[in-house]
Image: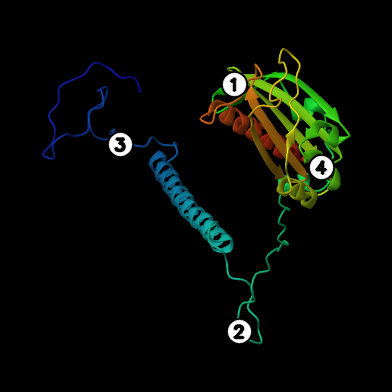
Amino acid sequence: MTEGPSQPHNPGPGGYGYPGPQQSFGYGYPPQQPQRPGEPDWSALAERTEASHRRRKLLLIGGGVLGAAAIAGIVATAVIATGHPNKPQPGPTDQATGTTPPTPTASFPAVTPPPPPNPLAVISDAHKDTAPITPDSLFPGDRVTVQGRTYAKATTDSTGRCSDAAAGGLGGVLADNGCRKLLRATYTRGGVAVTVGVAVFDTKSAADAAKNQAQGYVLPLSGGGVGTFCHAVACRLSANSIGRYAYFTTAGLANGGALSASDTQALQAGNDIATFAFNEIVQRGNNTQR
């Protein structure tokens, strides 16, 4: 139907009415036209079509509800079957006792790694203490610093005849206890010279015996710009042992003079170099473990 220009009209008592022919449709329904002879009953067909659409719509709505219910049922079943992912589910129940058997768990034997070897145990046993024993390995570097005090290394030597590098009875003590090697080094600082001698034995007990029986001194080692010192004059002496090593120091004035009774400089130098020797011997235990 072709729409024409809008025409004024009077609505019926109910408000808006049906617009007349050739009128634009306002708010309401289009007028019902009389059926022409021989034409189908368009109203009946429209009603049947509308009723069919309503039934189809109801079926679709009902099917959607049933489908949603079915999906909800599947989800609920899945939740019940799987349970909460972080909540352990009870295991099967023993029919005879009515109890739930414990869940098997994997067990592993406790393995404790062995502790690293003690450096003292290494340097006390000739079979374990296998690192090279040379003046360079025992007295490394050109300088030694102990608690901020620096000493310059002047010279070193080594001998398998331990008694040749000792005097005043110390040579006999070393020989009697089976000294294998005597290594020496001389250090200087501020007009003081110190010679340290390290005697090597097969066992810790032999080194301890040499320290306890010590008398005399290790001979001062000259060279590297250091002349003769501690010869027939008063000097500072020390003896100690660690592991299978005994170590001795002789400290005095580098110019060969005698120390006074109030000397502290040579005493400090002897203690510093003895500490250095102790640390280097202990370090051998760590080096051998590698």
Q: How is the image coloured?
A: rainbow
Q: Earlier in the sequence, mark 2 or mark 1?
A: 2
Q: Amino acid at mark 1?
A: Thr
Q: Residues within 10 Å of mark 4 (few under 14, many from 20)?
A: many
Judge from the rendering whether residue 150 lies leftward or rightward of residue 30; answer left or right: right
The residue tagged with tag 1: helix, strand or loop?
strand
Residue at position x 85%, y 32% in the image: 164
Q: Amino acid at mark 3?
A: Gln
Circles 1 and 3: CB atoms closer than 8 Å:
no
Q: Earlier in the sequence, mark 4 or mark 1?
A: 1
As displayed, is residue 30 above or below residue 76? Answer: above
Q: Earlier in the sequence, mark 4 or mark 2?
A: 2
The quadrant the C terminus occupies is top right
Which residue reaches farthest top?
225
Residue 150 screen position, x and y as percent = 59, 21
Q: Quadrant of residue 270?
A: top right
Indicate which label's residue lies in the foreground, 4 or 1: 4
Which residue is label 1 attached to? 150
Q: Earlier in the sequence, mark 3 or mark 4?
A: 3
Q: Quadrant of residue 278?
A: top right
Give the CA distance from mark 1 to mark 3: 123 Å
As displayed, is residue 222 above or below residue 61? Answer: above
Which residue is label 3 attached to? 32
Circles 3 and 4: CB atoms closer than 8 Å:
no
Give the CA distance from mark 4 to mark 1: 30 Å
Q: Residues within 10 Å of mark 3 (few under 14, many from 20)?
A: few
The residue tagged with tag 4: helix, strand or loop?
helix
Which residue is label 4 attached to? 174
Residue 98 marker: 2
